[in-house]
Image (cartoon, rainbow, N blue to C red):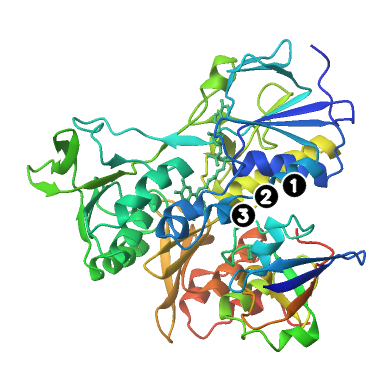
Amino acid sequence: MSEARTVLTGQDAVVIIGAGQAGFQAAASLRDEGFAGRITLIGDEPYLPYQRPPLSKTYLAGSLDEEGLTLRPASFFERNSIELLMGDTAVAIDRDKQEVKLASGRLVGYAHLILATGTRPRPLVAEGADLAGVHILRTKDDADALRPCLGDGSRVAVIGGGFIGMEFAAVAADAGHEVVVIEGLARIMARSVSPELSEYVTAAHRGRGTRMLLGSGVQRLTGDAGRVTGVVLADGETAAADVVLVGIGVLPNAELARDAGLEVANGIAVDGSLLTADPRISAIGDCANYPSAHDSGRPTRLESVQNAVDHARHVAARLTGGSYAAYQKVPWFWTHQLGLNVQIAGIGSADDDCVLRKDPAGEKFSIYRFQSQRLVCVESVNQPGAHMLARRMLAGEVRPSPAQVADPGSDLKALLTPAV
Amino acid sequence: MSKISYIQPDGNVLAVDAAPGTSVMHVALVNDVLGIVAECGGNTMCATCHVYVDAGDLVQLPEMEGDEDAMLDCTASPREPNSRLSCQIKVPAESAGITVRVPERQV
Ligand SMILES: Cc1cc2nc3c(=O)[nH]c(=O)nc-3n(C[C@H](O)[C@H](O)[C@H](O)COP(=O)(O)OP(=O)(O)OC[C@H]3O[C@@H](n4cnc5c(N)ncnc54)[C@H](O)[C@@H]3O)c2cc1C
Ligand code: FES
């Protein structure tokens, strides 16, 4: 084992496991930062790195094609000398030898290893979960399997009212299907958004004719000749369904790290600079659990494009510049459902105080969430200007008070740019 | 087919064919044009697909929407009167071509 280097040189090799949003960005940003050494990007999916958000939106609906999903063409990886090993799986990390073993038998040595393994859907544990017609949605293959189901006027049941389930419900309803959403908790998207926003989006789905069954557990799935026919709810009622989407959250892909003796707790544990306890191994994106400056330093694992991209840039800057500064970026996220553009900046918690600020013109508003009078999160509906302002406010120390937000006459933007 | 010309900060020009209706950002990515980052994938969320549209070509484009306008306040290189987000520019149908300048920085 060689000594861990603070700044990598052109002789060093970086290996990245996982060729998703974070892994791709890490490779690209290392080159942007001038890293001249070898970069190997290992991905078990057989495709060029692609983006996932359209899988439950435009790609699913058919308005975006495969080319539009792909992050960069093959020529990008050639031009940047990024060695792409697609369709191969990393199966073990030997930390003493600084070597990754692949399913193909190949061994790849590293000076620094970046884990960007993402997450996988949490499986539904219920009788009938393996029937034909029961789907999940994480990969392009998943979306390709679902797409044909949206053509034929079938009845759709969505188990789990998270972002992906609700986006799928929206696309299915737009395609003219009869849709039912079954959520165990009392409200949808409960883990991330305020009760007010849950309620608003629920009403929008109900307005589109979707049945919203909240606080409703699933007993089992019924089938006929191996195909799903319905979902039996905890109260015994059966919701008939030809297509079922299970969207009940994800599990971080952390087994590789755990087997290599690294700490795993709701993802791969890293410090503020996104480094594991091994100074030669970082973890980024959906699989990384890091202390977030935007959540009082609490261990945080976020699932968003912004998080994946900014983590990747941070690690690339550390490896080429040697600074162990803490990762500080403001988290942001978006979801599109039924024509609503929902944008979220910051991290809210269940006990936040919420203040609504509405644009008198039309269906545009933002919900400002406060912890002990301090602004921590802003949820905007069809109000991109407010969202962008929120991102800037949350990045700094000048934040409006609940009273300022509640006053429709106050100019929040002026707070940021005081008159000179 | 229309042509889109991308001028790099160093003056290098790449002209590529573009089907009407596709976005100037999409055409850039497919053709591996330097300097168009497009981190949010065309959702008016990131402003890393910023371009300066040739003044003469600006007039043939539809007015920008409010969200593009809001996002343009957050570009890494300065916003100019001809600044646009390339993900929001659709290649016009009966256009001979568009010329855009790629900014110095996107991040
Ligand atoms: C349907 C859907 C819609 C979404 N919508 C939005 C949205 O609107 N906005 C937003 O901000 N975010 C959205 N997200 C979340 C966003 O896509 C993720 O946060 C992002 O993809 C995380 O990037 P990542 O690289 O960490 O993980 P991933 O993109 O999951 O990439 C990890 C890759 O590593 C591979 N891998 C894992 N283990 C191994 C191994 N041992 N060897 C080789 N390869 C391995 C995986 O197969 C995968 O390809 C959505 C996600 C989904 C699934
Ligand atoms: S690609 Fe993000 S704003 Fe255009």
The amino acid on which the numbered mark 2 sits, given as a three-letter code, is Arg
Is A104 above or below relative to A287? above
Is A99 above or below relative to A176? above
Disc 3 chain ID: A
The amino acid on which the numbered mark 3 sits, given as a three-letter code, is Val
- Does residue A20 appear anywhere in the picture? yes
- Give the percent coordinates (x, y) of residue A407: 48, 81
Q: CA distance from mark 3 to mark 1?
A: 29 Å
**Which of marks 3 and 2 precedes in the sequence?**
2
- Give the percent coordinates (x, y) of residue A282: 68, 30
- A247 horizontally vs A10: left or right: left
The image quadrant where one finds the N terminus of chain A is top right
**Which of marks 1 and 3 precedes in the sequence?**
1
Callout in the foreground (2, 3):
2
- Give the percent coordinates (x, y) of residue A132: 25, 36
The amino acid on which the numbered mark 1 sits, given as a three-letter code, is Phe
- Asked whether the residues under marks 1 and 2 belong to the same chain, the reply is yes
- A32 horizontally vs A344: left or right: right
- Give the percent coordinates (x, y) of residue A313: 72, 45
Secondary structure under the numbered disc 2 in the rendered image: loop
Q: In this figure, which residue is indicated by the disc labeled 1? A: A76
Disc 1 chain ID: A
Give ligand 2's quarter of the image: bottom right
The residue at the point 74 percent across, 54 percent down is B32
Q: In this figure, which residue is indicated by the disc labeled 3? A: A330
Q: CA distance from mark 2 to mark 3?
A: 26 Å
- Asked whether the residues under marks 2 and 3 belong to the same chain, the reply is yes
Disc 2 chain ID: A
Secondary structure under the numbered disc 3 in the rendered image: loop
The residue at the point 42 percent across, 86 percent down is A360
Q: In this figure, which residue is indicated by the disc labeled 2? A: A72
Is A124 above or below relative to A166? above
